[in-house]
Amino acid sequence: MSHPLSLPLDGLSAIVTGAGRGLGRAEALELARLGASVVVNDYGQAGRDGSGEASATPAQEVVEEIRAAGGRAVAHLGDVSDHDQARSLVELAVDTYGKLDILVNNAGILRDRMIFSMTEDEWDSVIRVHLKGHFNTTHFAAAHWRARSKESGAPVYGRIVNTSSEAFLAGSAGQPNYAAAKGGIVGLTTSTALALAKYGVTANVICPRARTRMTEDVFAGFQEPEGGRLDPLAPEHVSPLVGYLASPASARVNGQLLVVHGAMVAIVERPRVAAKFDSSKETFSFDELDELISPYYADRPPNETFAAAEVLGLKRG
């Protein structure tokens, strides 16, 4: 990874959370390959549900892989759902590299259960790691960029890439906590994009589909190809998009939702009005709503609200 001066992320520093395995690992390696100095964050717990003892091994192995290829990297072992540890993560990037330029939020856990069986802790823990974890790191990164911009009197360079999921787009019956957290991340991203644009910072969100520890059961029926061919579900299909969104080339891309898997990237538009009804009186009555809305749905499949996701070929499993 000894690189020429022309690499798109030369001179930039990045944080990637949940970077010890799977998508985060592939993203950290890609950013380093493109020239960025990387803080590899991973709490290192063994279970995808957030169980097990924290371990330095996953993050440190990625750091060593980046360094062996000639790149720059340091490990951070904190839990991003903890506000103070998220602060220390951003401070580590600034102290080590002089500034922070790129934040990739990827850390997450799963605690799947149907809505009628889910416990309060199963709900809270997934919302905390995914949604609060995204907020925590974004908060401290945003404060850093705002302070730098005010000090210089000009916009600075900042890129945020957040991680949502098709569970938010198309629904996932056994993951109400995960789907809700991923939907919240989209809202957080669009709000952040509006708030930080004047400081020179963009924020975008991806919905990746990849074979990782988090999705091993989802893609259990999809066999990996033989003969050394790249798995269509490999995380390496996702990381180039993250590299692009982290780069100066994406300066005009802000507040966007992109779905990525295999050899495909889809830009998802914000919801559009599908039908509109006006009352013939000052306000609607029950009977009038029934006369207008019920026929609209009478001949439609029950799940047609998810048609956009199906058209894109995004339906999970």
Image (cartoon, helix red, strand yellow):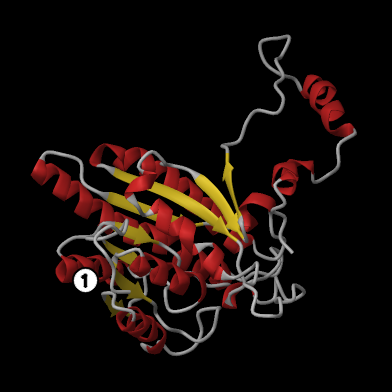
Between residue 195 and residue 112, name the one nearer to us: 195
Question: Along the horizontal axis of the image, is 106 left or right of 144?
Answer: right
- Horizontal placement of 207 versus 157: left or right? right
**In this picture, residue 140 sits left or right of residue 59:** left
Residue under pointer 1: 92
Q: Quadrant of the C terminus?
A: bottom right
Q: Tell me the residue at 39%/77% (across/down).
A: 42
Most foreground residue, 208 or 248: 248
Residue 232 occupies quadrant: bottom right
Percent from the top left, x then y, of residue 262? 62, 61
Residue 222 appearing in the image = yes
Question: Image height check: is 172 above or below 76?
Answer: above
Q: Is residue 50 above or below residue 120?
A: below
Residue 213: image location, x then y, percent: 58, 78
Mark 1 closeness class: few <14, some 14–19, many ≥20 residues within 10 Å: some
| Type of amino acid under label 1 | Leu
For the point 14% across and 64% down, which residue is it? Answer: 98
Please state which of residues 70 and 272 is positioned toward the viewer in this rendering.
70
Q: Quadrant of the N terminus?
A: bottom left
